[in-house]
């Protein structure tokens, strides 16, 4: 259970309580100023029983708890990370000369933190796109898309096999980044951190990443939505409407979607129905989420 | 008079307490100084006042360190004289008096008139060209050193001063101690404790076996009373007052100087991560106390088992010291290769860095050879180590010495890329960690990488997009 609570207490996690509070704060400002909704309606919307105790949300919780146990089985993947990092570091010797002059530590930290963040985001986009485009992978990923109500906890509505793929992706990206950066910068490599987490990750989560899975359709200017994915754009990604299929795969940057011609900007006051076409309520049963209906 | 129940409790309690006192008192009884152990030999009638004697071993240390100086001069007859000669007047070239660090002895004969050739490991030396025995390796290196300038062959990046010095430390002192004195000579029928080591000697068989093994390690007799840093300073001739424990104003090479692997143990231990020096000397001291306590009687099987336990502590730690040195110089060689590559890419002159590269590789190779002459089969570890290091450093043009021809000239062949050989050095470091569990890890080229992976690495997460 400590792992379960760590989701809310660890600043590396999106559901960290601080990020939830900041998301709520941003939502209030957005709904009050941009959409001119009365405060009482906004606050009561946050605690809407029909959302938090909908079949969809309850399915989120079940899968979330199931995965807590399943994730324990992934430890061997993480143990392999050091071996992979060393393998990459060693093989860099065959491709490049190891630099002898050192550059300032702050610059190394900035490069490493940026490269890790960008590569991490790109690989998320790529895997996410594959989860949609490859039929076999879609069978797993549709468990996430069967959510008909979005709450911040929907982020953990993930099929266990998908969790394996996410972990493998993370291991490969981190190993690649560490192996390559250690080759060029040796012992100076470290992350620019806030609360023990990458500064960029903290910023991303602090400015409302949790609203991506919510009914708060916070959008950016269209030009900005071609660079950064807004919560409203991610809600389009969850739309049941065929015209929104396979759009906005990105997590932080919309640039990847732009290059991949899958970027759709949000519409003003868009009203979206979430879920999968023709899905029944049975889709929210744990058995069906895991084995398929 | 006593309540029976109380007595029933009191008796075992007394036994436990008594045993505890006995055990703790025996632990506290460890001697501090490896000197002045009494004569325990029954029927000894000579004039000696102590049973301790290991001057021959210290003479061999002085021969080794003097020889190191001679190799760089390339004088074949001088090298042979110190290796296999019998002139008692051979000067101790190193360590010699330096400022107020006054050395008591000036000739080998003042210690004991010995040589090194008779005690060099006679087995095959894996890892050196041409399937040679220990003495053949030395003879080959002497010839090459005499042919080259100052014991340095730039074309093959061979530094014979380092190669000979580090190899002999293994093939003579380490081998003699762990493969002879701390091995078969601990058996009951070999040099028993109830007989003199040899006729007329003031010491028993086992006393002298143990003392000779101690001498080969090269630690000062008072090591347990001083720090690893102190022993290091003694070896570097920085501090005569710490060395001179008998306050005669001179440093006695017999039992006040630090030599050989004891010096290397101190160099690693002073970093604070390891305690090889004191663990080894402590085990020597415990073993010597045990033999002395037998008071001239033959050791029982259980006493010999205990003694073998101390011997094992010594062997394991000694091996680790050499493995630490292999680790360290693999790291130095790697760093030299980064520098050389950078200079070559900018079109500069690498002769100075090439000299350092050759020196460090010579130390690496010498220690790697030393590791393999303990008289035990290291199996696949030995094969891996020798293949990774090769018969020479990687030379310009990505060639390496792969053998010798019929006239003893080196044969070169295409080998690894520059980066590939650097990876070999990393793998040598990994091998020392995996097979010997080295801890001090000087010049660790992947230091911090595993910590980075642990702290920044991926964590399992089911977070979706």
Image (cartoon, coloured by chain):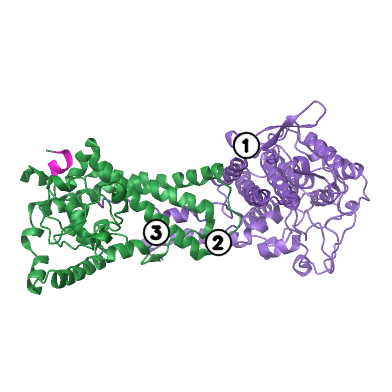
Chain colours: A green, B purple
Label 1 and label 2 in one chain: no
Residue B343 spot, x, y in % from top left: 68, 51
Q: CA distance from mark 3 to mark 1?
A: 76 Å
Secondary-structure class at tag 1: loop
| Residue holding disc 1 | B416
- What is the C-alpha distance between the residues marked 3 and 2? 75 Å
Q: Which residue is mark 3?
A: B8
Is B309 positioned to the left or the right of A29 in the image?
right
The residue carrying pointer 3 sits among few (fewer than 14), some (14 to 19) or many (20 or more) residues within 10 Å by Cα, namely few
Query: Observer-nearest residue: A77 or B155?
Result: B155
* B117 drawn magenta: no
- Disc 3 on helix, strand or loop? helix
In the orientation shown, which residue stands out farthest toward the top?
B406
Q: Is residue A284 left or right of residue A222?
A: left
Residue B5 percent location from the top left of the image: 36, 61
**Main SS class of the magenta portion in the image:** helix
Q: Which residues are magenta?
A: A286-292
Q: Residues within 10 Å of mark 1 (few under 14, many from 20)?
A: some
Residue at image coords 9%, 66%: A45
Quarter holding the C terminus of chain A?
Answer: top left
To which chain does the residue with label 1 belong? B
Which is more foreground, mark 1 or mark 2?
Answer: 2
Q: Residues within 10 Å of mark 2 (few under 14, many from 20)?
A: few
């Amino acid at each position: 259970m400590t792992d379960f609570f760590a989701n809310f207490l660890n600043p590396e996690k999106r559901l960290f309580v601080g990020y939830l509070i900041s998301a709520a704060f941003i939502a209030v400002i957005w709904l009050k100023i941009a959409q001119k909704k009365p405060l009482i309606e906004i606050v009561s919307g946050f605690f809407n029983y029909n959302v938090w105790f909908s079949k969809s949300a309850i399915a989120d919780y079940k899968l979330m708890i199931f995965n807590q146990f399943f994730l324990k089985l992934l430890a061997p993947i993480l143990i392999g990370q050091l071996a992979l990092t060393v393998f990459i570091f060693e093989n860099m010797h065959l491709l490049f000369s190891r630099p002898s002059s050192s550059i300032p530590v702050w610059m190394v930290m900035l490069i490493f933190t940026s490269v890790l963040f960008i590569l991490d985001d790109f690989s998320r986009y790529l895997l996410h796109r594959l989860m949609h485009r490859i039929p076999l992978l879609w069978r797993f990923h549709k468990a996430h898309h069967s959510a008909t109500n979005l709450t911040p906890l929907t982020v953990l509505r993930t099929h266990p096999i998908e969790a394996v793929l996410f972990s493998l992706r993370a291991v490969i990206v981190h190993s690649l980044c560490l192996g390559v950066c250690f080759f060029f910068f040796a012992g100076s490599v470290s992350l620019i951190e806030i609360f023990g987490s990458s500064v960029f990750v903290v910023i991303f989560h602090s400015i409302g990443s949790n609203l991506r899975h919510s009914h708060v359709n916070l959008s950016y200017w269209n030009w900005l939505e071609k660079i950064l994915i807004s919560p409203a754009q991610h809600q389009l990604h969850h739309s049941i409407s065929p015209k929104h299929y396979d759009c906005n795969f990105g997590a932080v940057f919309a640039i990847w979607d732009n290059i991949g011609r899958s970027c759709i900007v949000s519409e003003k006051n868009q009203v979206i129905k979430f879920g999968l076409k023709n899905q029944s309520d049975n889709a929210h049963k744990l058995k069906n989420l895991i084995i398929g209906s | 008079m006593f309540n029976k129940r109380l007595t029933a409790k009191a008796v075992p309690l007394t036994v436990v307490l008594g045993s505890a006192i006995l055990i703790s008192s025996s632990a506290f009884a460890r001697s501090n100084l490896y000197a002045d152990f009494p004569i325990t030999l029954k029927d000894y009638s000579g004039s000696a006042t102590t049973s301790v004697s290991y001057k021959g071993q210290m003479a061999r240390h002085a021969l080794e360190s003097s020889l190191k100086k001679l190799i760089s001069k390339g004088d074949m007859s001088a090298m042979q004289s110190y290796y296999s000669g019998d002139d008692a007047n051979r000067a101790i070239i190193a360590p010699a008096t330096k400022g107020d660090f006054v050395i008591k002895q000036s000739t080998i004969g003042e210690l004991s008139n010995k040589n090194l050739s008779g005690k060099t490991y006679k087995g095959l030396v894996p890892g050196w060209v041409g399937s040679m025995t220990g003495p053949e390796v030395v003879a080959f290196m002497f010839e090459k050193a005499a042919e080259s300038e100052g014991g340095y062959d730039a074309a093959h990046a061979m530094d014979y001063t380092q190669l000979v010095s580090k190899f002999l430390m293994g093939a003579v002192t380490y081998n003699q101690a762990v493969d002879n004195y701390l091995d078969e000579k601990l058996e009951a029928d070999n040099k028993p404790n109830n007989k003199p080591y040899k006729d007329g000697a003031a010491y028993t068989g086992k006393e002298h076996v143990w003392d000779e093994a101690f001498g080969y390690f090269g630690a000062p007799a008072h090591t347990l009373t001083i720090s690893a840093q102190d022993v290091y300073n003694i070896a570097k001739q920085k501090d005569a007052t710490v060395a001179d424990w008998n306050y005669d104003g001179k440093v006695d090479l017999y039992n006040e100087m630090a030599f050989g692997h004891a010096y290397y143990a101190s160099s690693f231990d002073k970093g604070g991560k390891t305690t090889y020096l004191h663990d080894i000397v402590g085990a020597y001291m415990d073993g010597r106390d045990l033999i002395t306590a037998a008071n001239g009687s033959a050791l029982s099987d259980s006493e010999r088992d205990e003694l073998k336990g101390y011997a094992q502590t010594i062997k394991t730690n000694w091996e680790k010291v050499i493995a630490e040195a292999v680790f360290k110089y693999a790291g130095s060689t790697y760093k030299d290769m980064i520098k050389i590559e950078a200079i070559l890419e900018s079109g500069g002159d690498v002769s100075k860095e090439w000299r350092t590269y050759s020196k460090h590789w010579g130390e690496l190779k010498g220690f790697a050879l030393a590791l393999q002459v303990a008289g035990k089969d290291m199996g696949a570890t030995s094969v891996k180590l020798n293949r990774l290091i090769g018969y020479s450093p990687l030379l310009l043009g990505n060639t390496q010495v792969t053998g010798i021809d019929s006239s003893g000239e080196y044969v070169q062949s295409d080998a690894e890329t520059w980066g590939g050989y650097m990876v070999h050095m990393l793998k040598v470091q990994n091998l020392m960690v995996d097979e010997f569990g080295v801890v001090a890890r000087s010049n660790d080229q992947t230091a911090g990488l595993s910590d980075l992976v642990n702290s920044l690495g991926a964590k399992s997460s089911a977070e979706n997009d």
